[in-house]
Image (cartoon, rainbow, N blue to C red):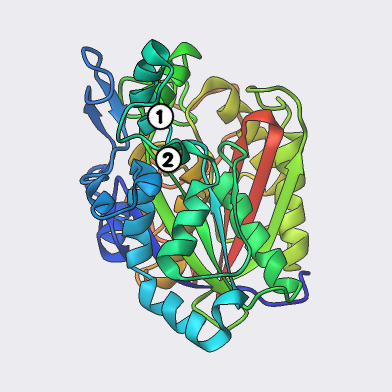
Amino acid sequence: MSGVAVYLNELGIDCALGSGQQQVVEALFAGDRPAGVRVTDAFTPGRALALGAVDGAEAGMAGLPQPFRSRNNSLLRRAYSQISGACADAIARHGAHRVAVIIGTSTSGIEEASRAMPGWLRSGIWPEPFHYAQQEIGAPARFVALESGARGPAWTMSTACSSSAKALASAARLLAAGIVDAVIAGGADSLSAFTIGGFTALESVSSERCNPFSRNRNGINIGEGAALFLVSREPGPVRLAGWGESSDAYHVSAPEPRGAGAIAAIEQALRRAGIGPGEVDYANLHGTATVQNDAMESLAVAAALGCTLPCSSTKPLTGHALGAAGAIEAGLCWLTLARNPQRWLPPHWWDGEADPGLPALALVAPGQRAGGPLRRVLSSSFAFGGSNTALLLERS
C-alpha cells in the first residue's frame, strides 16, 4: 500500500465527448448510439478519417502570449478553467510554492511547428508569428503553471500513450514524499496532420469508428483533448488508491506479445492499493483496436484480472488521445465513480464479432449497469517502447 492517501479532488475535462463533466457524462453513458468520434477530412484533405476532434479546440488561444499559443495549450486552458477556482483555493491555503504542475503530452505544439517548418526550410528563418517555444515539449507544464500561478515543481512527461497516466502517478509520489501539498496533474494532446500522417504511415489508422477486440479491428481513431485533476492529500470524492508502472522495452512500437509488462503494471497497482483482482468493479481498457495491442491486452487482462470483470475501451468515443489518453480515461473513470448514481458502466461500442483467437473478456454492453455498488475501477495505458501504466481509482 502507498501509506499516504492521495485524492483526485477535482476534474476538468475537454474531449470529443464534450467540454465539462456534465456534457461528458451524458455522452459517455448514452445507450442509444455512440457519440464523440466522427468522420472528417479536416486534417487530411481528400481522405476522410474517423477522428476524436474537439469542437472549438482552438478557442482557448485568445490572448495567450505567442510562446504559449498552441492547440495543445488551448485544450489545457479549457480544462483548467473548470477547476481554476479549486486550484486558486489550494494555492491560497498552501502557498504557490507548495503546488506543483505535472502534464503529460506527446504532441505539445507540433501542429504549429509543422505549419512553420516549410518557411524555415525555404529561408532558414522561422516565419512570423511562430515562436520556437510553441513546440517545446515542456511548454504545457510551463503554461499551466503560468495560468494557475502555481510555483512548485513543474514538468512535462512524454512517454507516448502512457504520458498523462504517468503524470498522475508522479503527482502521487510527490504528495507521498511531502514535497508539495497539491498538484495540478493530467495531460493534453491535439490533432495534427503531422501526427495523423505518422500513424497512417504505420498503417494503424481506421477510416471508420474503431472496433476494439473485434475480429474485424483495423486500426485506431486518433483523438485529442485534455483532462486535469487537482490532486492532494485532502479527502475528495475519489482516491488514487494504487498505481503501477513498468517498462519492458520490448520494441519501439510493438507491445510485448504476452502482455508481461502490462501484467506487471496492473499487479503493482493492485498491490499498492492493497486489494485483489476480485475487488475491482470495472476496468477501462487501453483498447486501441490495433491487431497487436488488443491481442496483448486481452491476454494481460485475462491473466491479471480474469475474464468476468466488466471492461470496455472508450476509444470508439474519444478516439485515441495519445499522451492525453491516460488522463482522459482516468477522468471517465472518475466520472463513473463520482457522477454516476445510476451505476452505469462505460459501454464498449463495437460490431460484436469477437476474435476467436483472444480470451473472451466481459465487454460492457450499451446501457449496462454494475451489478452492485461501484467502488473501484482500473484504467490502463500501454505505450510505444513498452511504457505501461495502470491506475486504480476508489470512491471515497
Q: Residue at x 56, y 40 (%)?
A: 361
Q: Quadrant of residue 130?
A: top left
Residue 56 against residue 223 in the figure, above or below:
below
Q: Position of residue 260 (x, y in %)?
A: 77, 35
Residue 62 pos. (x, y %): 23, 53
Locate residue 98 relative to residue 276 in the image: left or right.
Answer: left
- Give the residue type at disc 1: Ala
Query: x and y percent of residue 135 in the render?
Result: 46, 36
In the drawing, does residue 362 fall left or right of residue 23?
Answer: right
Q: Is residue 59 above or below residue 343?
A: above
| Disc 2, SS | helix
Question: On the image, numbered disc 2 is attached to which residue?
Answer: 134
Q: Say few, some or many: other residues with alpha carbon within 10 Å of mark 1 (under 14 / 14 to 19 / 20 or more).
A: many
Please rate how many residues cluster around mark 2, counting C-alpha atoms within 10 Å: few if below 14, some from 14 to 19, many from 20: many
Determine contact: label 2, label 1, CB under 8 Å: yes
Closer to us: 207 or 384: 384
Q: Return the residue at label 1.
A: 113
Q: Earlier in the sequence, mark 2 or mark 1?
A: 1
